[in-house]
Amino acid sequence: MTRKALITGITGQDGAYLAELLLDRGYEVHGMVRRSSTERFERINHLRDRLTLHQADLLDQLSIVKVLQDVRPEEVYNLAAQSFVPTSWLQPLLTGEFTALGVTRMLEAVRLVDRKIRFYQASSSEMFGAAREEPQNEQTPFYPRSPYGVAKVYGHWITVNYRESYDIFACSGILFNHESPRRGKEFVSRKITDAVARIKLGVQEKLLLGNLDAARDWGFAGDYVRAMWLMLQRDAPSDYVVATGRKHTVRELVEEAFAQVDLDWHDHIEVDPRLIRPAEVNKLRGDAGRARAELGWQPEVTFPELVKMMVEADLRRVQCELNQQELPP
Ligand code: NAP
Ligand code: G4F
């Protein structure tokens, strides 16, 4: 029988990759989208005739219950969130509503509609924040450093709590930073690769960045959605760190991206103090040993391959924009 999955946040980076993965595996895929005056479905336009979209919002409990009643999915992937860390200082309450309480609303809907639903929560390495040890694993204590990180800690623990209180198959995937050509342009990786393409093609001169010393464990989003799916295929629910185990600084990312187009980054990068965060997560590096042992998961795309993939995609896209051509799918 065809399995049904519901993805919240299907219009985001991970939602698009996960929808592709589930369609490839023969699922009937449903997506939850919020109402907007203009549709922004660029990341899933190529899949539109294979998806069913439902309007609901993380702020609106009944709308979520209604979607679950209409779809009756076997698996729910809760990817929707206010996911940009700097915005969480500007809008801490809204971030709490979406990214923290939104998880409870999803879990309440599961509890009311069908407790047999398998539930995935998109937790984050931002929960480790000022991490107490390196690398971080499932036992490392949390010390979040932004309203976003604090909200994700709530989302993580409420997921664990519903698993323990109601015997719901609920998993929390603690994913480290993962990027792709579909990454939002405000995140540092895509901000850099987009600028590299624009500078190479002569339509931008400078790129303003914040803390170049921050280090992250960056992987490829396409690899990471595979881990989400694997978690929901296990006999028992659990929590897993998903990471590459290698960290690089923002400066190294800049060097790698500019090297792809034979430019010297020193000629183009300026540090803008306004982009330094009120509280920084200086370094993150994950230990995905448990995911490797229990899920058989490991990343396939390396850091240099990821940067190359993103720079090449941005070069193609910017070139098409300049030629006023449509980007091939
Ligand atoms: P993203 O590209 O920012 O996508 C976020 C999605 O959430 C979008 O589809 C957005 O819809 C939706 N959304 C936001 N508020 C909503 C609301 N009130 N109601 C319904 N939908 C709403 O994020 P991503 O990079 O794919 O990340 C997916 C999830 O993983 C997020 O929860 C993020 O916090 C978490 N995470 C990401 C990473 C990473 O490195 N990418 C690492 C760890 C955890 P619109 O299109 O309408 O805005
Ligand atoms: O790319 P970022 O904005 O990602 P950040 O804050 O690590 O959060 C991302 O990963 C989390 C997983 O750990 C997710 F949960 C979250 O949803 C999101 O996807 O920033 C990475 C680093 C930071 O240390 C930041 O200070 O890059 C530094 N940075 C330096 N200059 C910059 C910039 N970040 C941004 N966005 N823009 C800059 O100009």
Image: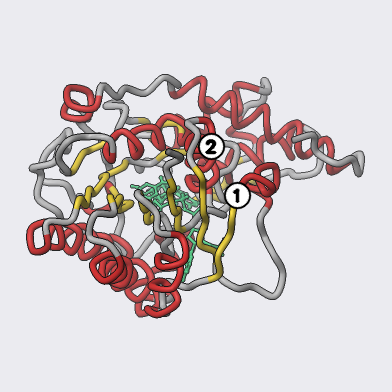
Residue under label 2, please give it: 23
The disc label shown at residue 203, or none: none
Identify which residue, 226 or 128, lies in the foreground: 226
Say how many tags the image has.
Answer: 2
**Is residue 314 or residue 116 the one in the foreground?**
116
> What residue is shown at x 75% (from left), y 44% (from top)?
204
Residue count near mark 1 (Cα–Cα under 10 Å), binned few <14, some 14–19, many ≥20 = some
Q: Residue furthest front?
A: 1
The residue lying at 35 percent from left, 50 percent from top is: 74
- Alpha carbon separation for disc pair 1 and 2: 9 Å
Amino acid, disc 2? Leu
Q: As shown in the figure, which amino acid type bears the numbered disc 1?
A: Leu
**Image: 11 above or below 234:** below
Q: Is mark 2 within 8 Å of ligand 1?
A: no
Q: x, y (%) of residue 209?
A: 52, 49
Query: Which residue corresponds to mark 1?
Result: 51
- Quadrant position of the N terminus in the picture: top left
